[in-house]
Amino acid sequence: MLLFPRNVRSKKPYKNEVSMNQSENKSPSFSKNAIKIMAMVPSIAIAFAIFYFSSQPAAESTVMSDGVTEMLLSIADKLHLLELQNIDVLAICELLSTPVRKCAHITEYTVFFLSLLFGLRTFGLHGKQLLNAALAITFFYACTDEIHQLFVPGRAGRFTDVLIDSIGAAAIRLLAPMFTGQRKNRAFPS
């Protein structure tokens, strides 16, 4: 028993070992926590941006969407992808307003999902756990966003919008195993 620095049966460290271990652990745990917090900053920033955009009354949101649509049409016209006249632009803007707005929501929530994947990895999540946790958080945030919109003038909270918001995240969740080697080949077991 004299050869071991502590009692093997009880596995209790000596007093000086306890104080040494505690002082050594303070710095690494602080830096690990700081890394976790910093890794979640992009997700938090995107969540705030989504909240800000959802706080805009319907009229302001429509003006912004129409502006983006006009800009995209202008770029397409300059690249000679489309040949538009001023009359066409207004009609096409009106036609594309809703799809552009929905695509913007899908993009926002897809970027949110991807930022969550980055942040949640620091908490030790990997593989399916990581993908499922990020998807669940994205879906939950989309639900809270629609509830929030119930209190914004001219906006409405709809479950169909939650599903639309979550499409990008769900698509990545479903496709990720194919690209990361997590998929089990059931047709040809080894």
Image (cartoon, grey):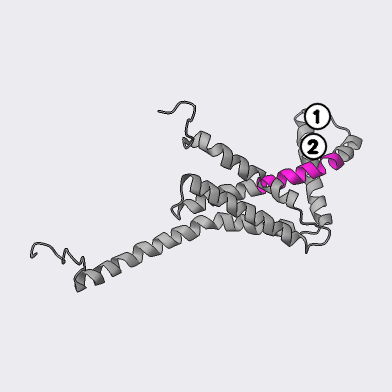
Question: In which quadrant is the C terminus drawn?
Answer: top left
Q: Amino acid at mark 2?
A: Leu
* Residue span colored magenta: 93-108
Answer with left or right where residue 167 lies relative to residue 70: left
Q: Looking at the image, do the residues carrying marks 1 and 2 touch, with CB atoms under 8 Å apart? A: yes
Image position, residue 96 (x, y; %): 81, 40
Does the image show residue 55? no
Q: CA distance from mark 1 to mark 2?
A: 8 Å
Please tell me which residue is depicted at 73% across the width and 60% down the height of the picture: 147
- What numbered label is drawn on residue 73? 2
Tag 2 secondary structure: helix
Residue that appears at 85% across and 39% down = 95
Q: Which residue is mark 1?
A: 82
Horizontal side of 188 relative to 91 (left or right) equals left
Residue at the extreme bottom: 15
Was residue 96 drawn as part of the magenta stretch in this picture?
yes
